[in-house]
Image (cartoon, rainbow, N blue to C red):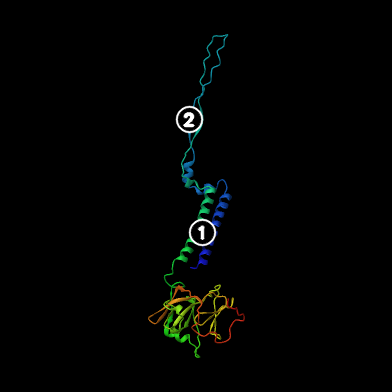
Amino acid sequence: MSSQTLILVAVAGVALLAALGAFAIAWRRSTGETSWRSAVSRETQKADRPARELVKVGTVEQAPPEQEVTEEVVEVEEAEPELVLAHEQRVVEVSPEEAGVSRRQFFNRALGATFGSFVAVLGIELLAFMWPKLKGGFGASIDAGAVSDLLIATRATDGGTIPAFIPEARAYVVPVNESNLSHQFEGRGVAAGGLMALYQRCVHLGCRVPWCATSQGFECPCHGSKYDSIGEYANGPAPRNLDRFTVEVVDDRFIINTGDIIQTPRAPSRSVEYPQGPSCIAVVVEEN
């Protein structure tokens, strides 16, 4: 999965969480005062109804103060006890999780989940950038095909060069006479079986460098950098030769190690003739 796909998935996930949160808040606000009854079972409602008991509460009327004039004693009649309804309340303690979360807690958790998702995506991207690819794709060892087939495919009938582009390796496979190579390529593992793999990217600003059949070289249309058929610097603002990969031959298979990029300075003298014809780009940038 590419980094752009992971970022899109993460953004979609965050948007989905935000939408669910907004829906939950709106739904809780829209419910009426009796909406909680629909979420409570009948047994719970029945158990929560207060039981009624009859409690006798006796009241005694106070006797009037003794009269100073008469010495008669007034007997106080006891009133009949009246009946009062006493309600027995059933109290059940609930945990904070059962009681629900507050609005502040909800937003804090939503913010934490969003930040956690961002950190997770960032960590995955960092791991994908730093961790070498173990198999397949750019950054791993790519099988470009049989050496014998590539030698035939990269040679024109007139003796010219026709680079074979390998999309998985982002490389041009070109034929090379290893005995005529500049000394800066010696011992670098950049040639094997009479073939070499050049990185497609221009070393100036990263444009893809196309092949020019008439001049028998690579010419960048972005700023006019030019290289010969084996990627040696020829003209333009490029600071060095085209980058190239280390290669090897295993059982007549040409293997390109795209995780090992070799950089070389401008060659003091080119190993092949260039140009061999008219240029493919109109603007010619003078050498700095």
Q: In the image, residue 216 lies at what x, y percent?
A: 53, 85
Picture residue at 48% right of the left edge, 63% below the top: 126
Q: Label 1: which residue?
A: 118
Is label 2 in a helix, a strand or a loop?
strand
Picture residue at 53% right of the left edge, 53% below the top: 111
Residue furthest bottom as drawn = 158
Give the camera-side residue of 245 and 147.
245
Residue furthest left as drawn = 251
The kind of residue on which mark 2 rests is Val
Quadrant in the rendering for residue 257: bottom left
The kind of residue on which mark 1 rests is Phe
Residue furthest right as drawn = 282
Q: Is residue 38 above or below residue 167?
A: above
Quadrant in the rendering for residue 250: bottom left
Dividing the image into 4 quarters, which one contains the C terminus? bottom right
Q: Earlier in the sequence, mark 2 or mark 1?
A: 2
Q: Which numbered disc covers residue 55?
A: 2
Q: CA distance from mark 2 to mark 1?
A: 65 Å
Q: Residues within 10 Å of mark 1 (few under 14, many from 20)?
A: some
Q: Which numbered disc covers residue 186?
A: none
Q: In the image, residue 120 lies at what x, y percent?
A: 48, 59
Q: Residues within 10 Å of mark 2 (few under 14, many from 20)?
A: few
Q: In the image, residue 170 lies at what x, y percent?
A: 49, 76
Is label 1 in a helix, a strand or a loop?
helix
